[in-house]
Amino acid sequence: MGAGAIIVAAGSGERLGYGLPKALVRVAGRPLVAWSAQAFAGARGVDTMVVVAPPGDEKGIAAALGESLGVHAIVPGGSSRQRSVAAGIAALPDSVDVILVHDAARPLITSAMVEAVLAGLDSHDGAIAAAPVADTLKRAAADGVIGETVDRAGLWGAQTPQAFRAQVIREVFADADDTELDAATDCAGMAERRGIAVRLVDTGRPNIKVTVPADLALVEALLGGTRIA
Ligand code: CTP
Ligand code: MG
């Protein structure tokens, strides 16, 4: 019984452009993936952690994590994010009753944020970290000028962690075909499509995904200061 966490770290980090897996890029003195692993290791209710590595870089990921965090397994990922999630699900012990999926690329996650998302499962089969959209939204016309303003009422940005009852997310993945595993960008989308109600949990703190070099600079500045659990 308890929650199993999957940290997906198998991406290549193309847009960051460092020529090495994004999870291994150092930020504020540690590899990116180690920040997330530390948050999950310290979260109440999380008792198993699996890290999904770029195929061939399992040893590099193991070295980046060190031995203190109690990682259950490091497994090779797939050609898409959701295929990497599937590899993580397969590596978790059958005994977990909750599965959390988190992007290694979101190092600002804290143990308290993980626990807040888990608490969202008290009322729903799924719960995800998210933030209400703050900017005014524009849809570009084909020529790159504004086509229209999109009403942002009710719009949220989806983040990770994303938590689900284990049986529910296992069934979702068992039902998914190759097209969906290639195209889906998060687990909640796959669950919603099957009518599963997924709760939005406003974590109320920055939880950006490091995607381009400017993100790294921002995260470096935030993690370089005192880290609040
Ligand atoms: N991811 C993964 N397996 C993949 C692709 C992505 O585990 N085949 C993970 C990444 O490691 C990351 C998260 O999914 O933690 C979100 O993906 P993204 O930010 O797109 O990371 P990358 O795919 O590494 O970056 P890029 O798309 O720029 O190459
Ligand atoms: Mg990617």
Image (cartoon, rainbow, N blue to C red):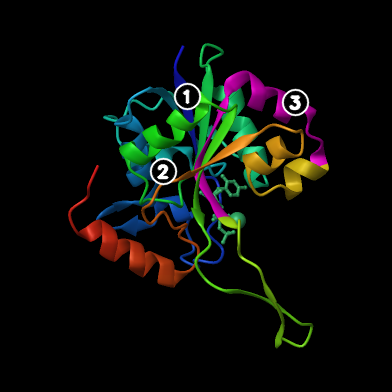
**Label 2 CB-ligand 1 distance < 8 A:** no
Q: Residues within 10 Å of mark 3 (few under 14, many from 20)?
A: few
Q: Amino acid at mark 3?
A: Ala
Q: Amino acid at mark 1?
A: Gly
In the rendered image, the vertical position of residue 85 relative to residue 2, given as above or below: below
Residue 29 forms part of the magenta stretch: no
In the rendered image, the vertical position of residue 152 relative to residue 11, given as above or below: below
- Residue 71 visible, this orientation: yes
Q: Quadrant of the C terminus?
A: top left
Residue 60's label in the rendered image is 2
In the figure, is residue 134 to the left or right of 195?
left
> For residue 36, what is the image quadrant?
top left
**Residue 138: where, in percent of width, then height?**
65, 76
**Residue 103: where, in percent of width, then height?**
49, 46
Q: What residue did someone put label 1 on?
A: 4
In the figure, is residue 206 to the left or right of 82?
left
Foreground: 123 or 224?
123
Say what secondary structure mark 2 lies in.
helix
Q: What residue did someone put label 3 on?
A: 174
**Label 1 CB-ligand 1 distance < 8 A:** no
> For residue 177, what is the image quadrant?
top right
Q: Which residues are magenta?
A: 157-178
Foreground: 197 or 94?
197
